[in-house]
Amino acid sequence: MYSLQELGWCDFFAQQLTGEQDLVPARIAEENRELYRIFNPEGAYLAELSGKLRHATQLRAELPAVGDWVLAQLRRGENRATVHQVLRRKGKFSRKIAGRKTEEQIVAANIDVLFLVSSLNREFNPRRIERYLTLAWDSGARPVIVLNKADVCEKADAFRTETEAAAMGARVVLTSATRGDGLEELRAILRGGDEDVESDLAPESEQSCVTAALLGSSGVGKSSLVNSLIGALTSDALHQGGQLTTQAVRPGDDRGRHTTTSRQLLLVPGGGVVIDTPGMRELQLWDAADSIGRTFGDIQELAAGCKFRDCRHQSEPGCAVRAAVEAEALDAERVESFHKLEKEEQFLEAKQDAALRSQRTKELRKLMKSVNRFYRERGR
């Protein structure tokens, strides 16, 4: 069995305990249509929400997500549980839900490190990495860019240099799930969570457990990396699912196929927790205004030299950003990506405001109906 600390428990969550003896802390390991698999020191349980919690939840983002810590009542004889409370999160990786609806979707909760995985084949796209970085900085987790499939790329070091130039301080790791490149570097991050972790680490009992989520498009090798990190799994209750299924990319265009269909939390032998996520073909921003500035810190720094404080870096005279592009000191595509993400965030903010106004109008109408009903019944 695993201790709470090995599952990622810390004082932040311990301070939220209610003291109810029949409720125990557990971590959400998998979610599927409001059915959950939870881990706690006694093992794995299939869980559902209590009626009170479901009734009190107004927003989708308030429901438990993979990585969340909850308080649950265990029915040990049935190997099932009921979730009564979701503990406050340390952080979250969110995106706008796919489709037209303006709503937040929690991809993973309470993560310390985000492994942003891209493969070094025709799928490699610096603009997509910038989008992932923008959302990662807002999550409260430290982003690490993982360039996978280095074994099939002759210019892996050149891609790494290009990525580091756009990473704005985020660590970049070259990996190969098949050859083993970079895996020990990832394990060191999981064991200690320190960028300067050395091979002679302190005893595991003295280290803090790190939770990492792997994010990236289909086919970049996230599940293969997870399988390489966790190694051969035992028959322990926390590892009932065995290793994750993988598929080869399409040979014609290197595009990936959806293999992982749900988010899953797994424990890494030697220390650390990883959350594997399905490939994302659509990754829309959510509340990322501040993170855009951090992802494009080089553009923000240049903007301080623009002639006008409200310069949009398009056709204004005296624009230091455009001057840098013309001097080939700044990639024009990077500036275009910056503009695209800024416009997307402004559009989303406008939709969020409209959705909030609509929700408040509905609540006011509901309140007024209750008041009118009260006075009608009072006058009878």
Image (cartoon, rainbow, N blue to C red):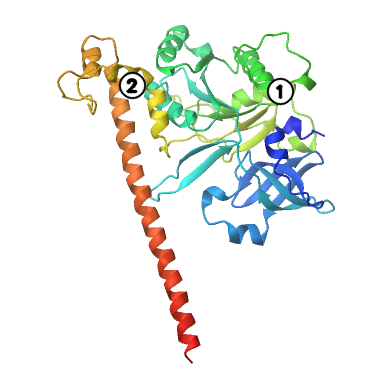
Q: Is residue 9 visible?
A: no
What is the number of callouts on the image? Answer: 2
Say above or below: 311 vs 368: above
Give the residue at x 44% y 70%: 366
Q: Is residue 369 left or right of residue 278?
A: left
**Rendering coords of residue 358 (x, y %):** 37, 59
Q: Which residue is mark 2?
A: 300
Label 1–label 2 contact, CB within 8 A: no
Which residue corresponds to mark 1? Answer: 231
> 189 or 121, which is in the foreground?
189
Foreground pick, 143 / 301? 301
Q: Quadrant of the N terminus?
A: top right
Residue 244 visible in the shown view:
yes
* Side (left or right) of 205 relative to 341: right
Residue type at the position of mark 1: Gly
Secondary structure at badge 1 equals: loop
Q: Position of residue 49 (x, y in %)?
A: 66, 55
Amino acid beneath label 2: Gln
When the figure is inspected, residue 368 is found, relative to residue 198, above or below; the finding is: below
Q: Position of residue 224 (x, y in %)?
A: 60, 25
- Real-space CA distance between mark 1 and mark 2, rounded to the nearest whole angstrom: 43 Å
Q: Quadrant of residue 113?
A: top right
In depth, the one of 241 and 347 nearer the eye is: 347
- Identify the secondary structure beneath mark 2: helix
Query: Which residue is rendered at x = 41% and y = 60% of the image?
Result: 360
Q: In the picture provided, is 126 more to the left or to the right than 175?
A: left
Give the quarter of the image for residue 287: top left
Q: Residues within 10 Å of mark 1 (few under 14, many from 20)?
A: few
**Residue name at image x 75 percent, y 31 percent:** 5
In this picture, residue 17 sits left or right of residue 289: right
* Label placed on residue 241: none
Q: Position of residue 99 (x, y in %)?
A: 40, 47
